[in-house]
Amino acid sequence: MCHWVEHYSKNKMRTKAELQQSIDDDLIWRRREAFELRLLIQDASQNKSKEAALLRAGVAMLYAHWEGFIKRSGTLYLHFVSNQACKGNELTSNFLAIKFKNQLDSIKLSSKTTTANHLINYFCHKLENKIKLPKNILIDTHSNLSSEVLKEINEVLGLDNTPYEAKKNIIDLKLVSKRNHIAHGNILHIDKQEFLEIYDEVFDMMDEFRNQVQNAAATDLFIRVTDIKR
C-alpha cells in the first residue's frame, strides 16, 4: 500500500476539514511544480531543442499530476466516508458496492448456494450495523486515466461526470495519448500553444474534481437522501 494512503488511514481522516486541507495541500504542490516547469519552457523560447525537450517533459508531468491527484483525492474521500462509520442502510448504493464487491465476486465464482446466502442474510438483517470500507481501498486509475476510466471513478465515488463529458478529446487525445507516446519513447512534437492549452485544461479539471469531492463531503452526499434527518 502506498505510504501516503497508510499515513492518512492511520490519521483516520475523520473530519471534513481534514479532508479539505489534505486535498488542498495536494493540489497546491502539484500546481507549484507544474508552474515551475512552465516558467522553464517560457525561458527556453530562444533554444528550440531545449524548448522541445521541456514541452515533452511538461506533457508527461501534467499527466502524472492528473492521474496522481484524481487517485489521491478520490482515495482520501473513500477513507473519509469509511471513517464516518455509517450504517449500511444509510450509505448510497455505490459505497455498498465497494464494501461488498469481494463477496459479490466470490458468489460469481462459487457454485455453493451458501456463499450467496451469507450475503443475502447480511442485507436482510444487518444493514443497521455500522460498516467500514476495506482498509486498503484505493481508487484504481489503471495507470491510464482516460475519460472512460474517469467516468468509472466518478460512478464509484457517486460524483457527477457531466463536467468532464465535453473534455473527452482533451483527456484522451491531447493528454493521455500524447503522454503514452512520450512514455514509450516515441518521437512526438508538442506545440507550445497546445501545451499551454493542455496545462490550463488539466488544472481546470483538477479544480473541478477537488470541488466535487469537497462538496460531496460537506453536503453528506454519501448518505442516502431518504435517511438524512432534517
Image (tube, rainbow, N blue to C red):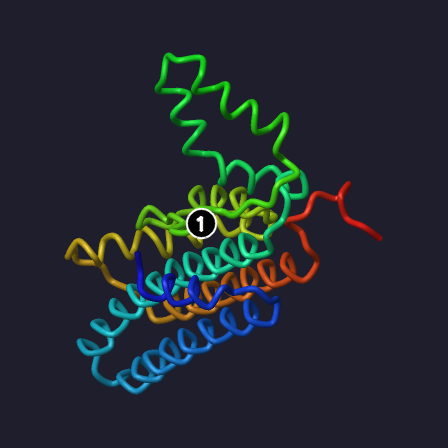
* Place of residue 171 in the rendered image (x, y in percent of width and height, measured from the top left): 42, 53
122 versus 24 height, above or below = above
Tell me if residue 134 can be seen. Answer: yes
Residue at figure coordinates x 41%, y 70% from the top left: 196
Residue at the extreme right of the image, as rendered: 230
In the rendered image, which residue does mark 1 sit on?
A: 169
Mark 1, Cα crowd under 10 Å, few <14 / some 14-19 / many 20+, is some
Where is the N terminus found, in terms of image quarters? bottom left
* Left or right relative to 184: residue 9: right
Residue at figure coordinates x 25%, y 69% from the top left: 57
Tell me if residue 172 can be seen. Answer: no
* Place of residue 117 in the rendered image (x, y in percent of width and height, measured from the top left): 50, 19
Report the front residue among 161 and 49.
161
Callout 1, which amino acid? Asn
* Place of residue 137 in the rendered image (x, y in percent of width and height, measured from the top left): 41, 49
* Left or right relative to 97: residue 111: left
Q: Quadrant of residue 124?
A: top right
Secondary structure beneath label 1:
helix
Report the front residue among 155 and 65.
155
29 versus 89 height, above or below = below
